[in-house]
Each structure stands twice: as structure tokens, then as C-alpha cells.
Image: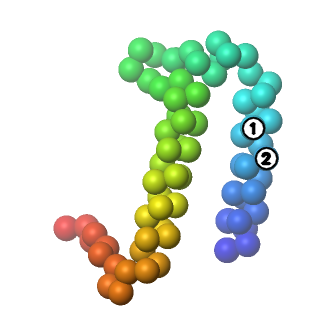
């Protein structure tokens, strides 16, 4: 588990450093019309993290958490 924590902490440092080195064009440009830009990917990850944080907090207070299982 410590390796996972260390890797996540590394990304928390590395990603902002990498983005600060890029121009607005580099982070906003889509590689192909149907592909996301780096800025869109980062925005999606941030949005997903915020939504998951809310879910993780709520599930702690559920007497019987509802968990979807694959069919």
C-alpha cells in the first residue's frame, strides 16, 4: 500500500510541474478531432475525483452500502 501512496504523491508533484512547462496551445490542442486535449483530460480527472470523494464520504455512513457487482 505504501508504494501506491508514494506513486500517487509523486503524480501530485509531477503533473503540475509538467503542465507549468507547457504553453496554453500545448495543453489545449487536441491530437485528433475526436480526442481530448491534455487540459480536458486533467479536467475530467479532477471532476471525477470530486464526485468520487463525495461518494466515499457518503458510503461511510450507509448501514448497508449498495455495491454494484458485474453480471
- Determine the residue located farthest toward the bottom in the rendered image: 63
Coloring applied to the structure: rainbow
Q: Residues within 10 Å of mark 2 (few under 14, many from 20)?
A: few
Few, some or many residues within 10 Å of mark 1 (<14, 14–19, 20+): few
30 vs 55: above or below:
above
Q: Residue at x 42, y 74 (%)?
A: 59
Residue for point 49% across, 39% down: 44
Q: Is residue 25 above or below residue 63?
A: above
| Residue depicted at x 52% and y 52% | 50
Q: x%, y% of residue 4?
A: 67, 65
Location of residue 26 in the rendering, given as x and y in whole percent from the top left corner: 66, 17
Q: Total of numbered circles in the picture?
A: 2
Left or right of 4 on screen, residue 64: left
Q: Give coordinates of residue 69: x percent, y percent.
A: 27, 71
Quadrant into which the C terminus falls = bottom left
Where is residue 8? Give x, y as percent: 69, 57
**Element carrying mark 1:** helix
Disc on res. 25: none
The part of the image, by quadrant, that contains residue 68 is: bottom left
Q: Are marks 1 and 2 in contact (CB under 8 Å)?
A: yes
Establish if 13 lies above or below 54.
Answer: above
Which label sits on residue 16?
A: 1
The quarter of the picture where the N terminus appears is bottom right
Distance (Cα) linking label 1 and label 2: 6 Å
> Measuring 48% from the left and 48% from the top, which residue is drawn there?
48
67 left or right, relative to 39: left
Q: Residue at label 2?
A: 13
- Residue projecting furthest to the left: 71
Helix, strand or loop status at disc 2:
helix
Amino acid at each position: 500500500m505504501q508504494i501506491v501512496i508514494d506513486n500517487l504523491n509523486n503524480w501530485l508533484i509531477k503533473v503540475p510541474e509538467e503542465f507549468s512547462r507547457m504553453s496554453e496551445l500545448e495543453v489545449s490542442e487536441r491530437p485528433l478531432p475526436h480526442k481530448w486535449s491534455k487540459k480536458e483530460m486533467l479536467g475530467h480527472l479532477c471532476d471525477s475525483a470530486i464526485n468520487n470523494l463525495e461518494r466515499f464520504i457518503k458510503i461511510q455512513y450507509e448501514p448497508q452500502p449498495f455495491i454494484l457487482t458485474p453480471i
